[in-house]
Image: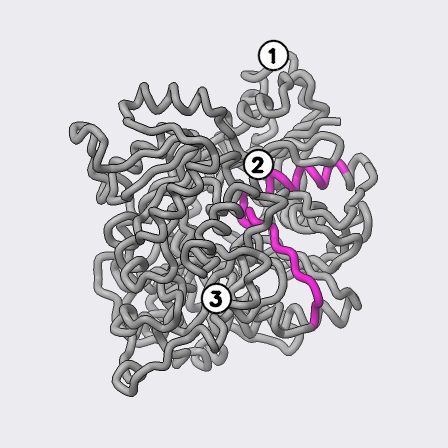
């Protein structure tokens, strides 16, 4: 049985194909269109999924959309009516769009699917509630026979937070918090207030938080959110404008904090760092209360997480260390893209009552679910792009790459199937030497063209993780933050300890300074021989050369650009920034050997994220 899941029309459109309960392929539309967070119908992603499965659209048993538009429209109308006459301008803008196309998404989807096959029967089209899609994406691919499931995001139809229990093929949501009370939207409000882009810049707030102090956490808890001991909450909507307006916050919000909304081009100050630290502290406290309550309610020792808030890896690390659950599994595409996977799996197990077999295996198979390219195809594509390259056997390619890394060169690494979700996990990655004191700054400013404060993640051999980090469990999807071990840290001088804010940035804090954040934390990716043997081999060879099993691993793109998908994307990005080496399959390219006329300027080629 073949089922196609689709998420679309909001942000991060994606498609996923399952066959008899197994995830065959999944990809975001942005990777093909090169439009960041592309919300359009995922034509390219669907075409890829069908091609990967080797089937035509006629062979699909069902197509499942990841939310229910009528329920979302009901929420929109009820919100405007409840808050009238406020928000009339927003109402006047959004309602015609809904009446023209969004309300009739079944017809729109059917029309789009008929472009794939004229014989598509609209009875094969199913709809899954948004939070059920998220919950299904978390539980069904997890390695657990049973688990508690927590979904947290901005908003689906009505739900913003939901608790569920999964057991075998059954998944039941038993508790919800409804719009407008939303932990995700509270965090997005702080994202907007500190001058970053909503639905894109939330991870910047998380990265900025360690530079500040949570001075405003009590202010937030006293005024913005009424947080109960069990983690349930309500927001005071008099401070927010997202229900009926065009911004996340209003003047009352700014007056509460004492400063206006930061413009994106305004310098970050200690105030903004303190706001980031404060909202992060409130989010962590809220999530910990929720998970402690969920553990008591379900008596489960396994927890699955999804929804955009589940991408907050700092909070995830604190859940793990809190000890109320023994095991945590987080959907790597926790945001809306992952809803495509969840919608398909929910239809298969829930609607069609098909059995589920776990065998203790991770159904996302390392999230390597995107396109791959054979060596001959890679060589042909690179030649057409004008690249000059050397073809090595696998051992030679590994040796050359590991040596270049040991020489502290920045490397583009393109291998195997593309990752599904927002993280590069060793298939479409930029790599560097974690031991280098200059690597973090150089990658941010000269390769990624992004803010200097942004931290980088370490990729570490799974068998060595406990030797370098305060972590003994798997973290294959770079979604858990742990501290660098004490014996790997560097003793700070009195003068260095007195530094504040961005001044902390260039101080080496450990033996792996390029991946050690200012609070000694790191967003860890454990690399497993079973799911990515080539990347595991590279790390192993680097360890042989240097004694260190840790590399900087960041996404292969520049700021504002989607992660590269094709060999041509990789070569263009390579020629548009200051990477030293590009490795695509067995092809090795050195920047110094390329045609200078092919050089591009990617420093401002994409809209800031």
Residue 220, compared with residue 558, is above or below; it is below
Q: Secondary structure at mark 1?
A: loop
Question: Residue 356 in magenta?
Answer: no
Q: Residue at x 47, y 42 (%)?
A: 11
Q: Nearer the viewer, residue 472 or 600?
A: 472
Closer to the eye: label 3 or 2: 2
Label 2 packing within 10 angstroms: few (<14), some (14-19), many (20+): many
Is residue 37 toward the left or the right of residue 466 in the image? left
Is residue 397 toward the left or the right of residue 3 in the image? left
Q: Residue at x 42, y 44 (%)?
A: 429
Contact (CB < 8 A) between labels 2 and 1? Answer: no
* x then y, percent, for residue 152: 58, 58
| Distance of label 3 from label 2 (alpha carbons) | 41 Å
Q: Residue at x 49, y 47 (%)?
A: 425
First in sequence, mark 1 or 3: give its number: 1
Residue 429 appears anywhere in the view: yes
Residue 38 is tagged as none
Residue 328: quarter of image: bottom right
Residue of label 1: 118
Residue 369 is tagged as 2
Is residue 375 toward the left or the right of residue 490 in the image? right
Residue 190 appears anywhere in the view: no
Residue 377, compared with residue 70, is above or below; it is above
Residue lying furthest top: 118
Residue of label 3: 237
* x then y, percent, for residue 412: 36, 41
Q: Secondary structure at mark 3?
A: helix
Closer to the eye: label 2 or 1: 2
Residues in magenta?
324-348
């Amino acid at each position: 049985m073949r089922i196609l899941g689709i998420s679309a029309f909001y942000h991060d459109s994606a498609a996923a194909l399952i066959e008899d309960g197994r995830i065959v392929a999944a990809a975001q539309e942005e990777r093909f269109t090169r439009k960041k967070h592309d919300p359009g119908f995922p034509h390219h992603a669907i075409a890829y999924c069908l091609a990967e499965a080797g089937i035509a659209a006629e062979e699909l048993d069902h197509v499942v959309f990841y939310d229910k538009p009528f329920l979302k429209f009901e929420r929109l109308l009820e919100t405007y009516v409840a808050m009238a006459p406020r928000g009339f301008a927003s109402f006047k803008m959004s309602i015609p769009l809904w009446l023209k196309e969004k309300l009739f998404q079944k017809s729109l989807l059917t029309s789009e699917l008929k472009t794939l096959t004229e014989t598509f029967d609209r009875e094969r089209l199913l709809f899954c509630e948004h939070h059920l899609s998220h919950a299904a994406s978390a539980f069904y691919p997890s390695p657990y026979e049973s688990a508690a499931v927590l979904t947290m995001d901005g908003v689906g139809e009505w739900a913003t937070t939901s608790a569920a229990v999964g057991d075998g093929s059954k998944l039941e949501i038993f508790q919800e918090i409804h719009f407008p009370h939303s932990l995700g939207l509270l965090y997005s409000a702080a994202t907007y207030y500190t001058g970053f882009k909503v639905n894109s810049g939330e991870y910047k707030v998380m990265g900025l938080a360690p530079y500040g102090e949570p001075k405003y956490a009590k202010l937030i808890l006293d005024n913005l959110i009424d947080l109960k001991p069990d983690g349930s909450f309500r927001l005071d909507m008099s401070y927010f404008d997202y229900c009926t307006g065009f911004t996340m916050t209003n003047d009352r919000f700014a007056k509460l904090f004492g400063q206006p909304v930061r413009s994106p081009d305004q310098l970050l100050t200690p105030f903004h760092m303190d706001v980031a630290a404060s909202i992060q502290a409130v989010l962590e406290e809220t999530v910990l209360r929720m998970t402690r309550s969920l553990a008591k309610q379900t008596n489960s020792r396994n927890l699955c997480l999804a929804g955009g808030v589940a991408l907050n890896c700092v909070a995830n690390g604190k859940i793990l260390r809190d000890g109320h659950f023994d095991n945590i599994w987080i959907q790597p595409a926790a945001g809306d893209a992952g809803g495509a996977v969840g919608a398909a799996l929910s239809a298969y197990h829930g609607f069609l009552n098909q059995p589920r077999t776990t065998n203790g295996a991770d159904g996302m198979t390392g999230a390597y679910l995107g396109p791959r390219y054979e060596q001959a195809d890679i060589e042909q594509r690179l030649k057409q792009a004008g690249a000059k390259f050397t073809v090595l056997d696998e051992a030679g390619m590994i040796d050359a790459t590991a040596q270049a890394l040991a020489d502290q060169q920045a490397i583009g690494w393109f291998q195997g199937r593309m990752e599904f979700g927002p993280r590069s996990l060793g298939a479409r990655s930029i790599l560097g030497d974690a031991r280098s004191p200059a690597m973090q700054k150089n990658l941010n400013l000269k390769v990624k063209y992004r803010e200097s404060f942004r931290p980088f993640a370490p990729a570490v051999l799974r068998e060595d993780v406990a030797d370098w980090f305060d972590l003994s469990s798997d973290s294959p999807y770079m979604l858990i933050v742990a501290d660098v071990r004490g014996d790997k840290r560097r003793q700070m001088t009195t003068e260095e300890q007195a530094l504040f804010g961005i001044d902390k940035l260039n101080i080496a804090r450990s033996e792996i300074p390029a991946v050690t954040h200012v609070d000694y934390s790191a967003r860890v990716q454990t690399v497993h021989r079973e799911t990515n043997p080539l990347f595991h081999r590279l790390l192993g060879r680097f360890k042989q050369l240097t004694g260190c099993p840790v590399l900087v691993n960041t996404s292969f793109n520049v700021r504002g650009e989607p992660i590269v998908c094709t060999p041509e994307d990789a070569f263009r990005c390579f020629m548009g920034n200051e990477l030293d080496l590009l490795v695509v399959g067995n092809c090795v390219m050195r920047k110094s050997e390329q045609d200078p006329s092919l050089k591009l300027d990617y420093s401002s080629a994409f809209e800031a994220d």
